[in-house]
Image: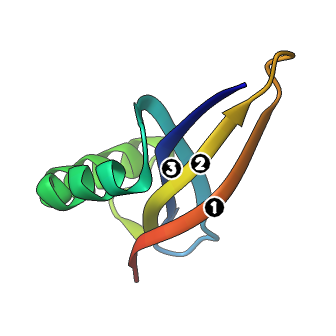
Amino acid sequence: MLKAVIIYVMISPLSGDPETFYFNGRGFEDYSTCENFYRIYESNIKNGILEFATKTFNTDAAVIHEIGCITQNINQFYEETLTNKKPLYKK
């Protein structure tokens, strides 16, 4: 089984329900490393998420509801499970 800690975000347009996105392009060995990465690059991450959200929702403004780290497990059949969600930012 493959295991990594990844960053997740819950975002929405100003007048919509939040959607959750998982960024598994950059996996971390543990929560501490994920959290440290977030704390170091927090402003860049938030700006990037807002840019992603405005393009994704085709809107001028978006809301970040939550950012955090979560464990991604992938078994031998490439089935994914997500566990141990740890929010780092909540609106």
Numbered disc total:
3
Residue 65 visible in this rendered orientation of the protein: no
Q: Residue at x 42, y 55 (%)?
A: 31
According to the image, label 1 marks what residue?
Answer: 84
Helix, strand or loop under label 1: strand
Task: Indicate the quadrant containing the C terminus: top left, top right, bottom left or bottom right.
Answer: bottom left
Q: CA distance from mark 2 to mark 1?
A: 6 Å
* Relative depth, front residue between 32 and 23: 32
Q: Residue at x 19, y 59 (%)?
A: 42
The amino acid type, in three-letter code, at marker 2 is Thr
The amino acid type, in three-letter code, at marker 3 is Phe
Q: CA distance from mark 1 to mark 3?
A: 28 Å
Q: Earlier in the sequence, mark 2 or mark 3?
A: 3
Q: Which of the labelled discs sits on residue 57, or is there none? A: 3
Judged by depth in the image, the label closer to the viewer, 2 or 3, is 2
Q: Which of the labelled discs sits on residue 11, or is there none? A: none
Q: Earlier in the sequence, mark 2 or mark 1?
A: 2
Q: CA distance from mark 2 to mark 3?
A: 26 Å
Q: Residue at x 40, y 68 (%)?
A: 64
10 Å crowding of disc 3: few (<14), some (14-19), many (20+): some
Percent position (x, y) of residue 61? 34, 63
Residue 60 in the image: above or below residue 87: above
Q: Quick check: marks 2 and 1 in contact, CB under 8 Å? A: yes
Helix, strand or loop under label 3: loop
Q: Earlier in the sequence, mark 1 or mark 3?
A: 3
